[in-house]
Structure formats: structure tokens, C-alpha cells
């Protein structure tokens, strides 16, 4: 007889029935995924990054396919936090979805206000702070590319909310460990790694950038080795739980992150191609645990032998 | 979702038509809607590819849909190599459809743009609407389904850029000629439905606004998901951005901000 | 009649008959490529990175395939600079190959001595300084991940040789432009971008790293968007000629780099799969110039319209 | 280099044999050498895959080689779906061969490891060497080419782990039994040539050293290039690292540092 394995994912103050989440920006506001399975079966849904005000995003073209990956410059288009709370959250709660809200601001103050607004809302199980956003004060640099700025953003959010706080790191840095430490020092309960890699493509016939925004974020299986590496580097730098994301296409890929130290994973680009894949990943992880005689996910997390 | 290929027929040097079973679990498609198709499990190419529903029919308890495709890259090459009895991976149907209302319908297709318009023609005929089709292409082998359109009762004119079939010139020349020759009164009743390369659609849009006829255009943008998850398929409209895969692919020419 | 286009690649003091080179570490010492075409048809051959002494490299497994890419941790195995000069260079010269020697050291002094030794050798058309090597003094960090260290390495080499000096940058940094400026300040004549992205893979069945060395370098088409982005960032940061490398699989890919600002390109991982591909890339670039009414490569370099 | 497929035959649930034309531009292969094969132009999977030359023959001015492969992943699945008349992309032959010298040859194969050994058997018979083969697999459908070996005159024993064909047990049990039953004197004349999974090769190596017979093992490592460019296929030997694709894939058991 096969013993069912305990798939509970423990992320500090946040506990989820299974470790497979949907990544921000790849499942809209979650509701759109319903045709592919009941939303309450998903570990958690991280909704599209929200800002204080509705944002139109970047002009088209916004996406381009690359080898085993894609570039996007959506520009964080979203309906704004108020519209989300009013129009989307109630429906998500009705379906029993566990909702994590991804937030981004252009100033510390915007982050603070987002945390305040969301801190008061019912039915949100965690905030995920996206620090891969241009720091208006620092020109082109992102908040998440600088340790001090990272810490300041996380502290600002932490002051305003007692909710579980995930901080999502960018891989576009010299030393991921340093940024991870800064986020934890600022008060992060767990870290999500990674956001997209910065990339660019050229349309050679028109001799123009393939994206109107010139630069975009690379996601998909192409970046998985970079994401696993960042996760592992963060694991050696900080003691908090980690969430792995980047190029997961199936259960085998999710297991790479978990073995390297992730307590949970997020599926991003794969949702575009196989929107119901989360279920197979959950089942695949469970099957792996059973095949290897483990009774709970926690036995597998960080089990990499060096 | 894996669907079984029932037939896959070569129509010309680079066009094929495939009939696939349409599982009961999927909603019935409307003309103008599309499906997202994948032929391999490897990650390059990564995205599914959109294909308009070319035809749809029920026989007894089962249904089948047709796709008409031009072989241009890996997915369409794989499709061309798929034999009856094998399966392809398909999601859908997605997007908005063409407008079936209106007294008189003019269908304008460039190249593979005929794919969704054939299905539209069939539904319009079932609805006993007055219609005509204008089909264009650079050369004869890119002009598809003319006989089939005529067979189902749709009067069809043809133009090719090299003159190898029908009138020499653009399909939009046919449209211009048609619109020129009729009264303002009648123009009010006309809905132009068009699908084809962007340049052609822009010309259709220009003619529609010059002659004050309604026009519905099926646009072709890059699509990662086809169903509103990625926000990548944005189209500029007068009131802001729209998603081609959800609010489109068919748009009123008027609302587009070109 | 089609007018032949002038494919001359101008890299400061170095001029090559065409812009297609073979990247270091992907064509051994060049001689191994002869079955796939006369070596003098190649723009230049950048030989495997040389150190002062012969180096054994890392233990196996050293490579693993990833989506549209691969990880390697060869560990800079090489026969050593003296053996190269004695056993390989004379043969390469005989075949008319244009040879660029890629060098790496673990201390400034090693770089200096390499430059001295190679500075005296006949039949080398340039040095390419690989600064993506662990800086022995600075723990895990690479020379090329720090602007000051980068500048010091380049200055050290520059002092010892008057040969054309290419400096090859790592993408594993927060700000490529900063490192590019440091290399140019140190005396680089041209920059090569990029070396591999740091990555990692896990063998989920054994729960061990797929590479014995744990971390490895990601190369191949997967990284092309990152490489094009780095090249473009360097171009905006420095005025010297640039050489683009990373994921080039065919002429179209090479054109992306050239349009974005590369005066030449290097083929790396593709040599493993299509060893004669360099010829098709040369022909493809020429065909493109002719199709677009250009008479020389220089008209295309950096022609990207933003 | 594109080569034409002349024949592609299914041998069991997951084994196939393919014959391809061998262009005059390529050197004639030796037993133990391999080719690097690619079936797609997309970049996933990225690498070519190595396959041992399973057989080689000339007829008139033309030559052909056979590959024997187990269907395990994308490349072998594509190979299985390739029809006679289509082409595959192949480079080679690469690597060192088996040793054809020696008085008496024992060929030991596990699963797909029989692929290069069949070609070795043919050459040894042409050279009128004394030889025998021991072929193993987990089950009957993994034991290939037994009849063919016997047909060309090679006495062949079989073992399967589940006992579905031949003796129940490991192929190395056959080897152990054979070595046990003969004199020290005769052992000096024996060369064991083996190909199969690593565990099996380690046992062959152990037996060879215990009974003091020469053994040559064909190793299977990951290979990006197959021809000495990447230095990725390193094997540890007593004198340092060797490239499996160039110094191997066949190594003296003695020199390996396992
Ligand atoms: C809503 C919708 C409906 C459609 N319906 C149909 C239909 O019914 N029938 C049909 O045949 N097609 C249809 N298309 C178009 C079809 O989806 C594309 O042709 C599809 O990309 C083909 O996939 P492929 O893998 O075969 O070729 P791809 O590799 O996608 O290449 C397609 C073409 O685009 C070019 N191309 C590829 N990448 C780039 C790039 N980065 N920059 C510039 N050019 C590039 C290629 O050279 C090639 O000519 C539809 C598109 C949309 C949006
Ligand atoms: C010198 C040499 C000669 C060979 N000759 C033959 C021959 O004659 N016949 C033959 O059938 N095979 C032969 N092989 C083996 C053959 O090259 C491999 O089986 C090849 O990888 C098959 O390619 P594929 O794309 O079909 O499957 P792949 O995708 O390469 O998968 C092959 C197997 O490896 C597993 N695998 C894939 N990736 C990983 C990973 N990262 N970690 C762990 N496991 C993984 C898969 O699960 C699968 O079981 C030879 C190998 C060598 C080195
Ligand atoms: C189209 C698109 C939009 C995204 N939007 C967001 C976002 O709003 N906030 C965020 O933190 N990450 C965003 N991401 C990043 C993903 O959440 C994820 O970190 C990244 O894509 C890597 O995972 P993947 O390779 O599985 O896609 C977006 C990614 C894509 C492809
Ligand atoms: C197996 C392997 C070995 C390499 N060795 C070196 C080296 O010795 N020195 C160096 O500067 N770059 C080395 N590189 C990096 C390549 O030269 C190149 O910068 C990188 O692979 C990106 O290009 P590609 O995607 O075309 O392979 C190596 C790359 C690979 C794959
Ligand atoms: S294609 Fe993804 S939202 Fe339209
Ligand atoms: S496989 Fe590349 S050197 Fe052996």
C-alpha cells in the first residue's frame, strides 16, 4: 500500500497544503485559471503585481519567443490595488483560493501604502514584495539590485503589516546572497527566487528591438539553471524558507529546486503553455516522495548532497 | 488537450487542411475564434501557436473542427507531417468571434486569412445572410478554398498580385471596386469581415472609413498564452490597450488606433 | 549583378577579413576544426584559455544539457602556455589561421607573466583576457565581478604587451557597463561579451549536483537574450569595438549582435553541434548585407534603431 | 552531414535498427567507433547524441552503416519515426575502436551494449579469430541480435534478469562461469570486449582483474561534441583525465580509475 505523503509546505508563518504556487504575472488574477482545475487545489496563487493606481503597461510589442524561453516587457500592467480588492479578491475567496498579493512601487512610500491597504484586507495569505522595479530615485537601477535599497523597501513594508512577507529577488546582481541577507535583515519571512533575467532581442529584418521597451525579462526553461543556482546561493546565505521559480516545466524541474533547498515552488511561463500543469507537478512531487520512501515534503527540502 | 487528427490534406505547395476531432469537453467554437496548438514536448519552440477555426461540423454525437494552415515554421511543419490517427495538443476555443449580425456581409481574405472566414461564411449561409467573398494572395498557390466557398453558396471573387488567378492586383482593389459601385444607402447595411496581413487590414480599414461601412478585422499578434494570462498580445485601441487574444482577435476597425 | 560586400571586421588595432570567430574553449586549440573547413577562412580562432602551467581541470561530470543550453565546469583544463607555443601554434600558423590567445590567471602576477610570454611569440594576432576566473585573494568572487579588480588585471596585462588586447566580460554582475568602463580604463582595445552565465543543475534521482563542481557556466541559445542585452549595455557605456558571443546558432543570431553594436562575433557551443557552422554564418552575413543594399559590414554595426 | 535512411526496422518494444547510407566523404568506421546524430533543427534537445556503429558493409561503390538503438528520449523517438528515404544528420566516425588483436575474443553486452559488439563480431570473424558472445538484458525484449550473431558464426549465450530468455541472471554471471571453467594458460589469450551499463562494466572489470584477463570496455558518458572540442566527457584514468570521445569510448579496464 502506498502511504500518502504529507505535502504541506512550511514557509515560516505561512503554511500551504502543497508547495506548488502560480507565479505572479503568469496567471492574471487567478480566476482565469479555473477552466484547468479547482483553484483550491493550487498551493497558492500569486496574483499579477499590483500598484497603487491602475497601470497601462508598456506599448506593444511586449513579448518575443527565444530559445526555450521568452522575453516580456509587460511593464507591470495591472488594475490597481483597489480594483483588485473590490472586483477580484471576493471571487477568489469564494473559490477557496489561497491568495498571495505581489506588490510593487516606485518609491518607498508607495510600498508602504500598498502594505497598509493590503494589510487590512481579509483573505490574503501573504504579500510578495517585488523589488525588481526601477528605483525612481536611482535612475535605471532596480531596488533589488542594491542591498541597502532592498533592506529599506522590506523594512518599509514590514512596518506596516504583520502578514507573512515574501520578498522576490532579481537574479541580475553580482551577489544574490548579499541581497538575500538584506531582505532578511529587513524583515522578510521567506524569499522568492527568481524574477526574470534581463534580456534583449533584435528583429534583424527591421533592425529594431523586438520589444518596444528595448529591454525585457527572460523567463522559461532557458533560465532554470540560473534560478536553481540563485536559490542555492540564497540558501547558503540566509536561514529563512525559500520559494523557487524559474523555468519549471514539470515535476522533475520542481524537484531540482526543492532538493536544492526550496520549501515551495512557483510555476510561471509554463502556465501559458500548459495551464493545468500545476496539478501534475503536485502529483509528481507526491509520487517522487513515495517512490523514495519519504513521508513528508520536509524530508526532501534541501536534501542535496554535495 | 490531445485531440485526434481525422484527416490532413495538402492543398498546395505550402497550405494544408487538417480535420481534428472536437472533444465534447470543449465549447463549440464561433467563427473568428482560434485554438492554441502544440506539436512537440520539447521546449523549443516554447509557445503554442494560434490557428483560427476554419470549419466545424457535428455528425451524430461527435464533432470535428478543421484548421487551414500555411507551412512557415516548426509548428506548421510538424502539423504537415502529422498523419490521420495521430494526435495534436490543442486548447481553446479562445477569443471573440466575428459579428454575425448585419444584412450584408463581405468577407475579405489575404493568404491564410481565408482560414477563419470560411467558417464565418458557413455560419452566415446557415443564417441566410446575404454574403460575398473576396480572396487574394500573392500567387495562385496562396489562394485557398475558392471552390469550397462557391460550393457552399458564397459568391467569390479572386485577385492575385501576379495575376496567376482571378484579377491581377490586391484583394483590396476588389473591395474598393465593390464599395465604389454601390449606393451610400446600401453601404449602411454592409459589414466587412477581413483577415490577412497587416498591410491589407490597414487598407481595408482605410476603405471602410472612406466609404463609411462597418469593418471587423481579425488581427495577428504574437501570443504566448492565447487566453489572457500573459498580457503580451496588446493592441492599441482608441480607449487604451486591449488583449488581442481575449477582446480580439476580431476588432471593429473603428476602435483600433493604428 | 551582386556586388561582393566588404566583410572586414575592425577591432581597433586588430583587423580581420571577416567578423566570425570561434570562441575560447569551444574549439580546443583550433586544429581540431580542420575537418570542417580551411582554418584561414575563419575570422579568428580564440584558443582554449591558457594558464602558465598545464591544468587538469575539474573532476567529471563536467557537462550537462539544459533547455536550449548546457552547463560546463571544465575548470579551464589546458596544456599550459609553453606547450601551446611549442606544439600547437606552429601548426596553426602553417594553416594560415589567425590566432587569438585567451589567458587566465589566479593572481595579477600570473596574468603579467602570461602577457610577457605571449607578447614575445610570433603569430598571435591578439590576446583575450578572461577575467571570469576566481580571484584567489577575494574568495569566491571573480576578477570580472569587480570594477577595480577588472581594471587592475587589464592594466597588468597592458603594461606587458603592445598586442591588441581584448577583455572578455562576465554577465554575472549587477552593472555590465561599469565593468566595461573599468576594462577600457585599464587599456582594453576591445571587449568580448559574454562569458557563460553562472548556473546549476540537480540530478533529482541521486539528489546530487549534476556537475561535480556544483556550479557551472551556462552557454548556448538559452543565453542569447542576455548576451545581446549585455552587449548593448556595454555599447552605451564605452566607445571601443565590441565582440558579441552567447548562443549564436546561425547567421540570424549573429546579426542580432552586429545590429546591436558588435563589430565581430564568436561562435561557441554551436561548434559542438555544427562544427562547420562558421562558414554559413559568414555567408549569411554577406547575403544579408547584399539583400539590404549595404556594401560593407561597418554600415551594419550598431545600426539598431531605437 | 545529412545521410539517407535506407531502412528502419522495429526489433522489439523499444529497440530499432536503422541502416543509413555511408557517404564516401566519411572514413570507414572501425568497431567501437561511434557517430553523433541529430534529428531536429530546434535547440532543445541541444546536443547531438552518440550511437555506436552497429554494422558496416559495402556493396559496389556505395557503403552503408547500421545503428541499433533503444528508444529512451527525444532523439531516439525521432529516429524511430524516421522513414526510409528521409535523412538524419550525422557526424563521425569518432573515437577509438576495440582491439582486434588477440587469440580469443569474448564479447559481453548488456542491453543496447550489443550495438557496437555486433560490428566487432563481424570483423573478428572476417579476421578468423576465435570468439564467443554473451548477451544480457533485464528481460527478453532487451536482448537483441542473438540470432544474427549466431548466423554470422558467433557462438552466443544469453542471460536475462527475469529469466525470460536464456539463463536467469546477469550477463556477468555467464562471464564469471566462463572464466572459472578454463585454465590460467588459456586466460592469457583472452580479450574481453564489453559494452553496457556502468554497473555491468564495473563487474566485468572486477572479473577481468580477478582472473587476469585483458578487458576493453566501451564507456557511456555525456558528450556535447563527440570530437574533442568541449573537454566535457572526461574519464578518470590512472594517469589523469582522458576524453571518452577521443581516447575512448573503448578503454583498457586496467587504466580506468574507478
Ligand atoms: C488569432 C490568430 C489566428 C491564426 N490563424 C491561423 C490560421 O488559421 N492558419 C495559419 O496558417 N496561420 C494562422 N495564424 C498564424 C500562425 O499562428 C503563425 O504563422 C505561427 O507562428 C506558425 O507557427 P510556426 O511554428 O509554424 O512558425 P513560426 O516559427 O512561428 O514562424 C512563423 C513566421 O514568422 C516568422 N518569424 C518567426 N519568428 C519571428 C520573429 N522573431 N520575428 C519576425 N518574424 C518571425 C518566421 O520567419 C515565419 O515566417 C494565426 C495567428 C493568430 C494570431
Ligand atoms: C559512445 C556512445 C555510444 C552509444 N551507442 C549507443 C547505441 O549504439 N545505441 C543506443 O541505443 N544508445 C547508445 N548510446 C547511448 C545514447 O547516446 C543515449 O541513450 C542518448 O542519450 C539517447 O538520446 P535521446 O535523445 O533519445 O534520449 P535522452 O534525452 O538523451 O535520454 C536518455 C536517457 O537518459 C536519461 N537522462 C536524460 N537526461 C538526463 C539527466 N540530466 N540526468 C540523468 N538522466 C538523464 C533519460 O531519462 C533517458 O533514460 C551511446 C552512448 C555513447 C556515449
Ligand atoms: C509575462 C510575465 C509577467 C510577469 N509579471 C510579474 C509581476 O507582475 N510580478 C513579479 O514579481 N513577477 C512577474 N513575472 C515573473 C514571474 O513571476 C517569474 O518570476 C519568472 O517568469 C520566472 O519564472 P518562469 O520561468 O517559470 O516564468 C512575470 C513573468 C512573465 C513571463
Ligand atoms: C565547454 C566550454 C568551455 C569554455 N571555456 C572557455 C575558456 O577557456 N575561456 C573563456 O574565456 N571562455 C570559455 N567558454 C565560454 C565561451 O567562450 C563563450 O563565451 C560562452 O560559451 C558563450 O557562448 P556560446 O553560448 O556561443 O557558447 C567556454 C564555454 C564552454 C561551453
Ligand atoms: S496571448 Fe497571453 S494575454 Fe493574450
Ligand atoms: S564530448 Fe566534447 S570533448 Fe568529448
Image (spheres, coloured by chain):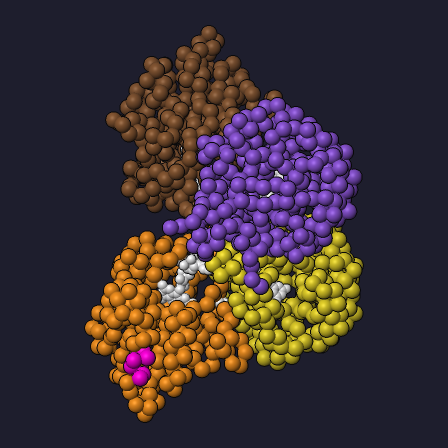
Chain colours: A purple, B brown, C yellow, D orange
Percent from the top left, x then y, of residue C208?
Answer: 53, 61
Q: Residue at x 61, y 32 (%)?
A: A124
B136 up-or-down from C242: above or below: above
Quarter of the image with the N terminus of chain D in it: bottom left
The answer to whether residue B159 is visible is no
Task: From the image, give the main secondary structure of the stretch colored magenta.
Answer: helix
Q: Which residues are magenta?
A: D175-180
Q: Is residue A45 above or below residue D184?
A: above
At which x and y percent is residue C244?
Answer: 63, 55
Front one among A30 and C17: A30
- The residue drawn where x is 65% and y is 37% is A127
Q: Is residue D179 magenta?
A: yes
C217 left or right, relative to B251: right
Q: How far across and down, in percent of the image, does residue C116 sit? A: 73, 75
Residue at the farthest left position: D151
For the point 44% across and 23% down, the residue is B97
Tell me: residue C286, above or below residue C35. above
Expressed as whole percent of the image width and height from the top left, the position of residue B84 reads 29, 41
In percent of the image, x 74 and y 70: which residue is there?
C107
Residue B253 is inside the magenta segment: no
Ligand 2, seen in the image, is in the quarter at bottom left
Is residue C46 or residue A278 the one in the foreground? A278
The image quadrant that residue C41 belongs to is: bottom right
Amino acid at each position: 500500500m502506498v502511504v500518502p505523503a504529507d505535502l504541506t509546505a512550511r514557509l515560516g508563518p505561512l503554511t500551504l497544503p502543497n508547495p506548488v504556487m502560480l507565479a505572479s504575472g503568469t496567471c492574471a488574477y487567478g480566476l482565469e485559471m479555473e477552466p484547468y482545475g479547482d483553484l483550491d487545489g493550487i498551493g497558492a496563487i500569486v496574483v499579477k503585481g499590483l500598484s497603487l493606481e491602475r497601470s497601462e503597461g508598456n506599448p506593444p510589442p511586449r513579448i518575443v519567443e527565444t530559445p526555450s524561453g521568452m522575453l516580456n516587457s509587460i511593464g507591470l500592467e495591472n488594475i490597481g490595488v483597489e480594483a483588485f480588492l473590490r472586483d477580484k479578491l471576493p471571487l477568489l475567496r469564494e473559490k477557496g483560493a489561497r491568495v498571495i498579493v505581489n506588490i510593487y512601487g516606485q518609491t518607498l512610500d508607495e510600498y508602504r501604502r500598498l502594505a497598509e491597504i493590503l494589510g487590512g484586507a481579509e483573505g490574503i495569505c501573504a504579500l510578495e514584495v517585488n523589488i525588481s522595479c526601477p528605483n525612481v530615485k536611482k535612475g535605471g537601477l532596480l531596488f533589488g539590485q542594491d542591498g541597502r535599497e532592498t533592506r529599506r523597501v522590506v523594512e518599509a513594508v514590514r512596518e506596516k503589516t504583520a502578514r507573512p512577507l515574501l520578498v522576490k529577488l532579481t537574479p541580475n546582481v553580482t551577489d544574490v546572497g548579499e541581497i538575500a541577507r538584506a531582505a532578511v535583515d529587513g524583515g522578510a519571512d521567506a524569499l522568492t527566487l527568481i524574477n526574470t533575467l534581463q534580456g534583449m532581442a533584435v528583429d534583424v529584418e527591421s533592425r529594431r528591438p523586438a520589444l518596444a521597451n528595448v529591454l525585457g525579462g527572460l523567463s522559461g526553461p532557458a533560465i532554470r539553471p540560473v534560478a536553481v543556482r540563485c536559490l542555492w546561493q540564497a540558501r547558503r546565505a540566509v536561514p529563512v524558507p525559500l520559494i523557487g521559480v524559474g523555468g519549471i516545466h514539470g515535476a522533475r524541474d520542481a524537484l531540482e529546486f526543492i532538493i536544492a533547498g526550496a520549501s515551495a515552488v512557483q510555476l510561471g511561463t509554463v502556465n501559458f503553455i500548459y495551464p493545468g500543469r500545476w496539478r501534475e507537478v503536485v502529483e509528481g512531487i507526491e509520487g517522487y516522495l513515495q517512490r523514495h520512501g519519504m513521508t513528508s515534503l520536509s524530508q526532501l527540502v534541501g536534501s542535496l548532497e554535495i | 488537450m490531445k485531440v485526434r487528427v481525422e484527416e490532413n490534406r495538402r492543398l498546395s505547395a505550402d497550405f494544408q487542411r487538417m480535420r481534428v476531432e472536437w472533444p465534447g469537453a470543449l465549447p463549440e467554437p464561433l467563427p473568428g475564434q482560434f485554438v492554441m496548438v502544440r506539436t512537440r514536448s520539447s521546449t523549443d519552440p516554447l509557445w503554442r501557436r494560434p490557428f483560427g477555426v476554419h470549419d466545424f461540423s457535428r455528425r451524430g454525437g461527435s464533432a470535428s473542427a478543421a484548421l487551414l494552415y500555411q507551412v512557415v515554421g516548426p509548428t506548421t511543419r510538424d502539423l504537415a507531417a502529422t498523419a490521420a490517427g495521430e494526435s495534436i495538443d490543442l486548447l481553446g476555443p479562445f477569443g471573440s468571434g466575428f459579428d454575425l449580425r448585419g444584412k450584408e456581409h463581405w468577407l475579405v481574405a489575404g493568404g491564410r486569412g481565408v482560414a477563419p472566414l470560411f467558417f464565418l461564411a458557413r455560419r452566415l449561409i446557415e443564417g441566410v445572410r446575404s454574403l460575398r467573398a473576396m480572396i487574394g494572395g500573392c500567387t495562385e498557390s496562396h489562394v485557398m478554398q475558392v471552390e469550397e466557398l462557391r460550393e457552399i453558396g458564397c459568391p467569390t471573387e479572386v485577385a492575385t498580385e501576379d495575376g496567376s488567378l482571378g484579377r491581377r492586383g490586391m484583394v483590396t482593389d476588389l473591395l474598393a471596386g465593390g464599395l465604389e459601385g454601390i449606393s451610400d444607402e446600401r453601404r449602411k447595411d454592409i459589414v466587412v469581415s477581413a483577415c490577412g496581413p497587416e498591410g491589407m487590414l490597414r487598407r481595408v480599414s482605410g476603405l471602410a472609413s472612406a466609404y463609411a461601412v462597418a469593418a471587423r478585422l481579425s488581427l495577428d499578434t504574437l501570443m504566448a498564452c492565447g487566453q489572457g494570462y500573459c498580457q503580451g498580445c496588446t493592441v492599441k485601441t482608441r480607449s487604451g490597450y486591449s488583449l488581442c487574444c481575449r477582446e480580439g482577435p476580431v476588432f471593429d476597425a473603428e476602435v483600433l488606433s493604428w
